Amino acid sequence: MIQLLDRKVRQMHAALEGLSTDDLSTIELTTGATPTLYYAAIDFSGNQVNLANTATLLVTNIACLKDHLKAWCQKNGRPFEGDDLINSDREVPIVHDLWNLDKHAELNRPPRSGFRPEIRNLRRPLRLSTGTGAGSEALFMFDPRTGTMTFRASGTGSVSLQLQGEVVDESGRVVGEFSAICEKAAVGWEGALLRAGVPIPAR
């Protein structure tokens, strides 16, 4: 059982790492010209279906820890605090409701978060970071005449695409940023696992 839980936590870690990618091949460039105008547009987000799949994978890998932790506690005589965590936390129940809505389309009981969450406006903006190392750099250049894009990073610098989105309630009010909610929910479940005596692999 511990091997299964270890694998599930590692899957969650991998899904969290999938929020950021240094694979820039999905960037789409559109150029065109008229007799009086030359134009260019860059879309960093890529395919919306792929973004939705990445988001779904992350939600699933976080929320499914509840059932795996419950089985662990039953077999090892440890108290199960998963429901207490869902009832007392802000982000954990949001991810739990997103998971149930994805599985069942409708909820047959009131949402644990107190509202019906939905992910909207998924995108992958470009992120440049020089890191913390002396002399590090991150560079993005675009030549509108040739359509050539140049990316460069050195030292602790990085150039990456970061998955972002909004979680909204029934009225469309934004309740938080998707990746931040998932990160905090993952930390919440890691704490519950540790308190139940389950060792957590390092990220």
Image: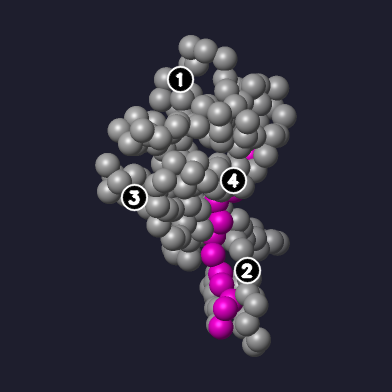
Of circles 4 and 1, the one toward us is 4
Q: Quick one: which residue is furthest to the front in this view?
A: 77
Quarter of the C terminus within the rendering:
bottom left
Q: Are marks 2 and 1 in contact (CB under 8 Å)?
A: no
Circle on res. 105:
1
Q: Residues within 10 Å of mark 3 (few under 14, many from 20)?
A: some
Marks 1 and 3, Cα distance to the nearest angstrom? Answer: 29 Å
- The magenta stretch spans which residues? 155-166
Of circles 1 and 3, the one toward us is 3
Pick whichever of labels 2 and 1 is earlier in the sequence: 1
Q: Is residue 123 visible?
A: no
* Left or right: 69 as drawn, with respect to 28: left
Q: Quick one: which residue is furthest to the bottom in this view?
A: 135
Residue at the spot of label 3: 6
Pick whichever of labels 1 and 3 is earlier in the sequence: 3
Of circles 3 and 2, the one toward us is 3
Marks 2 and 1, Cα distance to the nearest angstrom? Answer: 37 Å
Q: For the residue marked with disc 4, what is the amino acid?
A: Lys
Q: Is residue 75 magenta?
A: no
* Left or right: 134 as drawn, with respect to 97: right
Image spot of residue 194 (x, y percent): 47, 47
Image spot of residue 156 (x, y percent): 57, 78
Circle on res. 184:
4
